[in-house]
Image (cartoon, grey):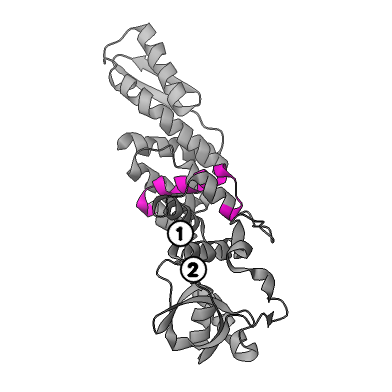
Amino acid sequence: MASVKKGLGSKGKGLEALINTKAINYGKGSFSQENLLEIDINKIEPNKNQPRRYFDEESLLELAESLKSYGMIQPVIVKKIQDYYELIAGERRFRAAKIAGLKTIPAIVKNLDEIAAFEVALIENLQRKDLNPIEEAESFYRLQTEFSLTQEEISNKVVKSRSTISNSMRLLNLDSRVIELVRENKLSAGHAKTLLPISDNAVQYELAEKIIDEDLSVRTVEKIVKSLQQNENITEQIEQKTVFFDTSAYHSIENDLKTLFATKVKLSNKKNKGKIEIEYYSNDDLDRILALFKAIQR
């Protein structure tokens, strides 16, 4: 994930424009006293709009041990709602503080509307590279659908190109099972994007599992997907060929098979019997051909 530069500019671009981070020296633990409180941790509620859904338990335990020894150096950000506070940014620190048994934690209180609060939470996570690719895609999608922002406006706020925003959201078009594999960090976003051209969700998921099980490279997957796309058009043509055909028909089918498997194919016939020979040139090439057979069987 591309990093977001510090000092994101004006006109609503970035975290500094939303919460004035210049007043906060995170590295030395020195903060502006304005709106900085020590708040009872039991009066802070998690943010239901938190972009981040997955928190590594081992990492939380490590942070909790650090908080026990040194306390919380960087405050969380909250907003006041009646008799409690809603967390805007810093949920990982908040969760670790609860594990550590802290009674109070430092918090900056901000009066932000729903969209501004969501933007702060999103941008903090982007700056820290805390979001997995699916959480990032879902966050961009929410900004577009729930808050009616254009991709250009989202691009300006998070300091990413429009193409990055668009390509990120395309991940949400994957089969739901493939999406979960990416969310759980079992499948990389790069591998997942190569599966987008596959229209059959079952084939998409089957290939995703094959990628994980056999540790296939992105390049190998791209070749398999390309062959599968060709298969959609060619399989039907092959099935329509008559059983009784002349020499020219043999050559036609042989050429179709060569195109389908993207390799040398030899078709031989004798007395209404024959054989098909398909060549492969590496283990990856064999995997690609076997994946095509499985797709045809469907």
> Residue type at mark 1?
Arg
The question of residue 151 being in magenta is answered with: no
Q: Residue at x 45, y 54 (%)?
A: 143
> Residue type at mark 2?
Leu
Which of 40/189 is in front?
Answer: 40
Number of numbered callouts drawn? 2
Q: Which residue is mark 1?
A: 183
Q: Which residue is mark 2?
A: 112
Q: Residue at x 41, y 57 (%)?
A: 180
Marks 2 and 1 in Cβ contact (< 8 Å): no
Residue 10 on image: x %, y %: 64, 56
Q: Quadrant of residue 2?
A: bottom right
Q: Residue furthest right?
A: 28
Which segment is the magenta one?
Answer: 157-177
Residue 193 on image: x %, y %: 49, 44
- Tag 1, which secondary structure? helix
The Cα–Cα distance between marks 2 and 1, rounded to whole angstroms, is: 29 Å
Q: Residue at x 40, y 52 (%)?
A: 178
Query: Looking at the image, is 40 positioned above or below residue 186?
Result: below
Which secondary structure is most common in the magenta stretch?
A: helix
Judge whether residue 204 can be spotted in this image: yes
Query: Mark 2, mark 1: which one is toward the viewer?
Result: 2
Query: Looking at the image, is 101 positioned above or below residue 281?
Result: below
Residue 25 on image: x %, y %: 70, 76
Residue 165 on image: x %, y %: 53, 47
